[in-house]
Amino acid sequence: MEFKKEQIEYLAELSKLHVDTDKVEELHKQLKSILEYIGQLTALDDLPATAKFDDPVKTVNVWRDDIIKPLSEEDRRAILDSAPDKQEDLIRTKPVFKNGK
Amino acid sequence: MENNLKNLTIVKARELLASHKITAAELTQYYLHEINNRDKDLNSYISYNENALDEARIVDDKMASSDSVDFLEGIPVAIKDVIITRGIQTTAGSQILLNYIPPYNSTVMQKLRNKGAIVLGKTNCDEFAMGSSNENSSYGLVHNPHDLERVPGGSSGGSAAAVAADLCVYAIGTDTGGSIRQPASFCGVVGLKPTYGRVSRYGLIAMASSFDQAGPITKTVEDSAIVLQALAGEDNKDSTSSSNIVPNYVLEMKKDITGMKVAIPKQFFNEGLSSEVGDRIKEQIEILRKQGVTVDEVDLPILDQALAIYYIIMPAEVSANLAKFDGIRFGNTAPAEELWDVYKQTRGRNFGEEVKRRILIGTYVLSAGYYDAYYKKALKVQKVMKYELSKLWQNYDAILGPTTPTTAFKIGELTIDPLTMYLSDIYTVVANIVGSPAISIPIGKDSKGLPIGLQLMGDAFAESKILQLAWHIENFRN
């Protein structure tokens, strides 16, 4: 599985991460060497069988019902105040679509 | 007064407080003064708790009207900046959280507060705890107190440096692949990563949720046991926290070690290990044998896969966990006309290089076409490793080896090549992959005068056993 430079642009788009064009070359070199290293696992094909439940630290999902708890005015204020852009008691964002589209 | 305050442990500080030889306010004042005088050479703190002295006076009043002094009461602590502290800036070492003042406390912080601990400030770390040298902090690098031209390790580099330089009594760090133990080893202090689920993760800014744990960085093994005692336990805010009973670690730790069994994996003494580090570890093995501990070499080839497993599962979780930093609800934001651009620019401008690399790698190993080959395979090999180690725990109380392949390296020495930097975690990631507890303790110095760390790893929830061996090693040495 060769890792190509063009894939960086695609990964950056998927992860909503702007990457400067002049950084792509170096980034490609670094990611390629990391992927080559971790690729050693893909070559392992004679793994011993393990039973379903012999995990010593149990990984089970713990679910509970949603509970609505009242929030103090102080906490509500603090949470709102954390937002960089506000309009009255609402957090404001930029439009999802361009004007007129 | 000042002379007898140098290198105070929790045990000693509590004695002084309980016998009224010193007040919490005096102790806090002493550390604030030391930080002010000496931290400019180290940069171990990012921010300070402006209310520390007032809080210490309140604790003094409470202690004056009470018969007993609790273990951490009135004792100054430093908190790694990935741990959420209500009302105190929490940056995770990132520009994306510049000026972020959390509206709530992590459970770790709340437990320390309830015990009357005095928070001095927030310690420097690699951005979002991603790094092994503290050079990835956007608030400047941290210098190793043993040699200012060298790194303190990472990612809890500020916490370890602050303890080693005596700029706090103890510190709290977090460990996802070695971030408590590796800097503790580089700085010559004790660092303990608890079992996954032993300490609540509520309010730790998540890096890899299935590996992260908070734990103590201290001057002695006993201090680590005391802090773990205070932090451990079930928390309804973290569904992965365990309801297992928390033992009395300090009592358990001092029990006789005769007859205990320790395994030494061949794989931990590979060609990457510096001979000086290896020799010092072997000396300790002989001392343990003389104390009646059985030490056997074991062959665990699966350990050679540890770093590859780690660098697949961890970035996968990173790419999901860091999606929440979008510049909308909190933290830094970048100007742009459209929402998608706000996300991209905010993240592109405010995340550092290592964070970007891990997000991209994580996105890659989770994406269609690569998921089975990388992520799913890593989970399978992780399971095999857990299975192999669970067989080992039937015969052994602990795995012993070096914490790191080398002692502290020079600032800038490994920054060009991220993969070589990752190799400094090769012995520590195993504990995170299988969820085990592990401790690093200092066992002396190399010919350059740099500290060497020994690591002990145990079965899940067997903190008592590794503390027991660690405490005895520490005390045979002294």
Image: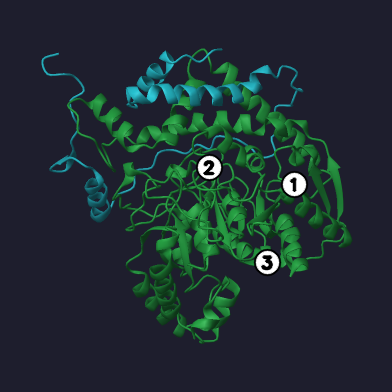
Chain colours: A cyan, B green
Read off the chain for label 3: B
Q: Whole-Å distance between the Cαs marked 3 and 1? A: 34 Å
Are the residues flagged by discs 3 and 1 from a single subunit?
Answer: yes
Tell me what residue is drawn at x 42 percent, y 21 percent.
A25
Are the residues flagged by discs 1 and 2 from a single subunit?
Answer: yes
Q: Quadrant of residue B467?
A: bottom right
From what the image shows, is residue B72 above or below residue B245?
Answer: below
- Provide the secondary structure element on which disc 3 rests: helix
Q: Which mark is residue B413?
A: 2
x and y percentages locating residue B313 in the rendered image = 56, 30
From what the image shows, is residue B251 above or below residue B232?
Answer: below
| Circle 3/circle 1 CB separation < 8 Å | no
x and y percentages locating residue B427 in the rendered image = 67, 42
User: Which quarter shows the C terminus of chain B?
Assistant: bottom right
Quick one: B464 or B220, which is closer to the camera? B220
Q: Which mark is residue B275?
A: 1
- Provide the secondary structure element on which disc 2 rests: loop
x and y percentages locating residue B132 in the rendered image = 54, 44
Please, which residue is most extreme toward the left here? A100
Q: Whole-Å distance between the Cαs marked 3 and 2? A: 40 Å
